Amino acid sequence: MPDLYDEQIARLRAIKSPVAFLDNINHEWCDGLGLFAFVRPPRYEPVLGSTCGCLTLIRGGRGYTAYDKTGAPDEALAAAIRADKRIPADVDDITPESLDAFAEWQRKLDILYGTKPKDRAFLGEEEEPCDQSSLATT
């Protein structure tokens, strides 16, 4: 049965224009949606200056790290993410083919944090999904 990540991948892969694909990726990546959620427990709110990052920021090696289920930095988890060459080090390098690696990691994180994909879809419990009707789809 498809989950949030499968649905997100299918929608993104259906976009035929490379420019529209990257526009959608950048929007969802900036909002930390689904495949691009921060590597932290869902109710943990990083403080200003936190090094909490998403898979791409962590992989990019710019000082970002992962957090364990208690909200503490987890350098072992961050090292495993950095070692995974399937994760692009920059948002502009995300391709339709790399999305499967994001889904694989997010599912591992759901198990680690004891969450379901929907729990990690958006940054805040109260946030509404962004309006994607203005984004290009071709």
Image: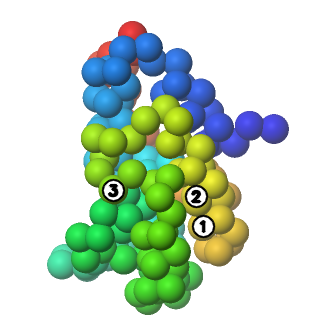
Judge from the rendering whether residue 7 lies leftward or rightward of residue 49; answer left or right. Answer: right
State how far apart marks 1 and 3 are (Cα).
Answer: 19 Å
Q: Earlier in the sequence, mark 1 or mark 3?
A: 3
**Amino acid type shown at disc 2:** Gln
Above or below residue 102? Residue 128 is above
Q: Which mark is residue 22?
A: none
Q: Which residue is mark 2?
A: 106
**Amino acid type shown at disc 1:** Leu
Element at label 2: helix
Q: Quadrant of the C terminus?
A: top left
Q: Which residue is mark 3?
A: 89
- How many other residues sit within 10 Å of disc 2, few (<14), some (14-19) or many (≥20)? many
Judge from the rendering whether residue 59 lies leftward or rightward of residue 92; answer left or right. Answer: right
In the image, 30 versus 128, the foreground residue is 30
- Answer yes or no: do the residues labelled 1 and 3 have beta carbons within 8 Å? no
State how far apart marks 1 and 2 are (Cα).
Answer: 5 Å
Q: Residue at coordinates 44% horizontally, 86% vertically from top-left?
A: 75
Element at label 3: loop
Above or below residue 131? Residue 58 is below
In the image, 113 versus 130, the foreground residue is 113
Q: Which colour assignment does the render follow?
A: rainbow
Q: Which mark is residue 109?
A: 1
Q: Residue at coordinates 49% horizontally, 32% vertically from top-left?
A: 96
- Answer yes or no: do the residues labelled 1 and 2 have beta carbons within 8 Å? yes
